[in-house]
Amino acid sequence: MPSAHLNSVSSQRLCSLCHLLLRAKKRSWEVPGGCKSYSQANNPHPKNQVGKMSHLKNKAEKQKRQQEKLESIEARLATGQKEEPPRQTRAWALKNTVLYDIPTVAGEKKDTSGPLPTSYSPRYIEAAWYAWWVKEGFFKPEYQHRLLHQKPETFCLSIPPPNVTGSLHLGHALTIAIEDALVRWKRMEGCKVLWVPGSDHAGIATQAVVEKKIWKERRALRQDLTREEFLQEVWNWKEAKGNEIFQQMKAMGASLDWDRACFTMDSDFSQAVTEAFVRLHEDGLIYRNRQLVNWSCALRSAISDIEVENRQLEGRTELSVPGVQGKVPFGVLVTFAYKVEGEEGEELPVATTRPETMLGDVAVAVHPDDQRYTHLHGKRLCHPFTGHLLPVITDPSVEQDMGTGAVKITPAHSHVDYELGRRRGLPFVSVIAEDGTMTAECGEWLQGQNRFLAREKVLAALKERGLFRGVKEHPLVLPLCSRSGDVIENLLKSQWFVRCEAMARRALEAVESGGLKLIPEFYEKNWRNWLLKTNDWCISRQLWWGHQIPAYRVTVLGSPDLRDEESDGLWVVGRTEAEARKKAAGMLGKSEEDLKLVRDVDVLDTWFSSALFPFAALGWPRQTEDLQQFYPNSLLETGSDLLFFWVARMVMLGEQLTEKLPFSQVFLHSMVRDAHGRKMSKSLGNVIDPLDVIHGASLQALQKKIQNSNLDPKEVAIALEGQQKGFPQGIPECGTDALRFALCSYSTQGDGINLDVAAVENASRFCNKVWNALKFTLAALGEGFTPLAPEEFFPSSPMDRWILSRLYHTVQDCTQWFEEYELHLITTSVHLFWLHDFCSVYMESTKPILNSRDPARLLSTRQTLYSCVDLALRLLSPFMPFLTEELWQRLPKVDSKSHPSICVARYPDTKQLAHWSHPEEEANFLLVQEVIKAVRSLRTKLQLTKARPAVYVVCPELSARGVYENYQEALQTLSLAGSLRLLPDSEGAQPPVSCITMKANNHTDVYVDLQGLVDPQEELLKLRSSQQKLERQLADLTVRIQEARYQAQSSLKAKSNLQKKISLLHSQLEQIRQATETFQKMAAR
């Protein structure tokens, strides 16, 4: 073939095109004035907060914008001003919904014998397939032995178990789309695949849901029931509602092995939790201690770090707090004075944002080198309400330049003060109780008062005693309970803790040694930073729903019962009470009958049981067949926000309890945000429900959800306005496949995914394109077509070789990107093949052949069409399982041994298709496409919509002209030319004078004959207008480039860019000059 001269250049063009299309790839004490802020009081390591300040600042700015927006809406409502009309977006038309109405028993195969509906309809496509897939066992690893292309490789991963209370949100949808694509790909590759489903009991969330339910139905509190009665209510609710999210996951097409589904409160899983607790305790890694924990007074429970939301306040801010009428001011700095014992008129001022905690002050600290307070070293201060004397102590960590330089010390309510109090042997005085009221330590005048009402009383009393020194606004970080909205307190509690240091060190070594790979790699830095600073983990939760801690408090019968929490007594841990009793008897040297055991009423942190999921879901601690086959898992895929709270804990407990890493790779996807990059929030009205995208929703339906939510009425106003602006037409029905494909089309390994519903609409249109391509192909194949296997088909025509070579390289790209988890590059590559290569180019080029009567060419073209759609559907199947199954089932099969479903069909393999690789054909066709592009560009400019003009391709270069000759039929068809002639030059056989010309490349010009197709006078007027416009632009740039100031101040890059603009204008003017000559000649005839 005459292409050798062009191959190197064209291959470079091919490379460039592919890359363009596919590569997308000293501790700080208190705040000024010696005051303590909430953020420091609730963080064991205040210096670790420095890296978060930028995030908190951004959050504060967002809250400020939201407040401004709220004020704007309130002002508009108060004045009766009408809302601004929403911005107009492209309206979407309601689709003609086609339903699958053939009676089909659940689990039976869908009837595909009838003709395809006219257009793509998600509801028609998605009907009936999933139940058949499940019944046939396609999703089970045992099905692998029936595959002719089976591999020895095992692939296993566990889905991050969603909360049993939950419903499908975009985070779940993204996880399912990614994981199911990987699982389906591996299954089609022939691997033994297990994707483990499960749900989490979600202690706090589930208990809260059921408490609301019984209050609504009976006006009863949890405390009005026994623990057993309440737990039965929870189980009843779980049986009735708890599997809803599983049904939604099935609607998403998730190919999970449902026979292996587990729930973290199932008996087998509960046994694993108990076993883990006992083993860790026996290894000295779980211990009981009295220390500070994050406490939610509304929930009356300790909560995990992940359940604490830090809210940045810029100054005085009034907030609603559960249990308090009216709003409570925060962001206020109060200064008061302590009188010095025996020193008339001597005082030491301190400042705080939490004046109610001064009842628990046990000392005041100053820097040892602070000359202002040297004379007070060793002195004592008089507490105005308790009468206690507080020592003035010195500590080098106090920043003497911050405010007064004197810091009040409250060890029982501040992590910072707790550490100092332990070092200095200070007493711990708890002044806030579990329910948020003041304790007896405060005196009768405050005991039982809510902490925030007590704050006002304390301030009034300080003023009355003449100790109040002032108040001012002050920025702070306020820790809030994400579950209840309550302000978090640090309380001293006897709790169970996991010792994390040694396990964290091994988890860090696993990544550093390469045993555990984090994808993307930039998370390794975060992994290291967190594990080096990790603290012991409080795992006690004061709830009823959850895994009750297998620990027992032991007393000897006849001895006094120790009820003081500070005298915690003897605790033993056991798998059963009998085991614990036997342990206790051995420890105390008593008979088992002499002992009384009372089980800890607390339950374990939900994250503790979740951390066991990869192995407990497979049967651990029993050595089950599943555990031996599928543990360790091959991969963990989850959101990047769970790297520390779940992933790190799985790695730590997995290594400790099984002596193996639970998985060898962790793939972390980005968070889903709205189209503008904002976090999705009900209060902003930008939350997108995946089911609304799948089934469609009117604006009225979307707004009804907001109105029926539990948002504050003022937040509802903001949300409704945001929703109306974001979705003025509602959300169109897009279908599951389109949603999955769109989610995977974003780069999941970046900073975030800014999801636009328009992207899902585009994916839905792509589905319709594939649908129509199959209709075309099926019509072209006709009745009785018998396809060949890919290995048996050797294409002969240039276009057949080109499209199959493109298919080969698409397969090659998809395989590579799957291995690297770059799903967005796979979707780009598959989308490019279907839309550009196959539909826009190859299918169009076949129309003259299909209308011909050449049997050999017809057979080759039909086989090529079949090969393309068969294999391209398989490439698409991991992302669009419903559409590809519907269409693939309608294709004729190679033989009777063909796979029953596309989801277990063989994924295209480059080894199988190696004989289709013709890179020189692809390079040559890129040259042909340059000519096609030039002709179509001229057609567009001249608005030749239906005309088929004569086209002349002038190319003096022999090798290039040989390529054009080889593709002449396709060149004419795709250029929409009435006729097409190839000329060696324009000197010999000249094109007609009525031709307009354009340069296709360095050696090829195209001429389009316009005789009888356009009005030359009209075209001359248009050209004259364009010429004048370009000449003005050229004059302006010429003047600018000649200015001395420009020459002196502009960079070389700026000058170069301007020169390029000038060159382009000259080129455009030359094209206008040539076109003008053509039209003048035409007009003169």
Image (tube, rainbow, N blue to C red):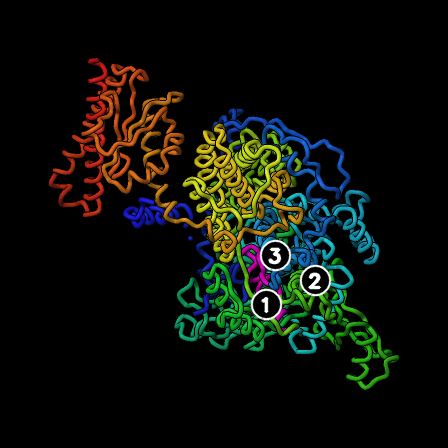
Mark earlier in primary sequence (3, 2): 3
Which residue is at the front of the view, 573 or 11?
11
Which of label 3 and label 1 is nearer to you?
A: 3
Relative to 288, does residue 809 appear above or below in the rendering?
above
For the residues labelled 3 and 2, say whether their Cβ atoms are less than 8 Å apart: no
Which residue of the protein is positioned furthest toward the right in this rendering? 593
Quarter of the figure that contains the N terminus: top left
Residue under numbered circle 1 = 651
Q: Main secondary structure of the magenta part?
A: helix
| Residue 924, picture quadrant | top left
Q: Can I make out residue 471 in this image? A: no
Relative to 153, does residue 163 appear above or below in the rendering?
above
Q: CA gap, disc 3 to disc 1?
A: 34 Å
Residue under numbered circle 2 = 617
Instruction: Decide if residue 295 is on the left or right side of residue 218.
Output: left
Mark 2: amino acid: Ala
Instruction: Decide if residue 1036 is on the left or right side of residue 1.
Output: left
Residue 867's x, y, as percent? 53, 43
Task: Write the start and end of the magenta stretch as one range.
Answer: 633-656
Mark 3: amino acid: His
Which residue is at the front of the view, 510 or 548?
510
**Residue 149 shows which numbered tag?**
3
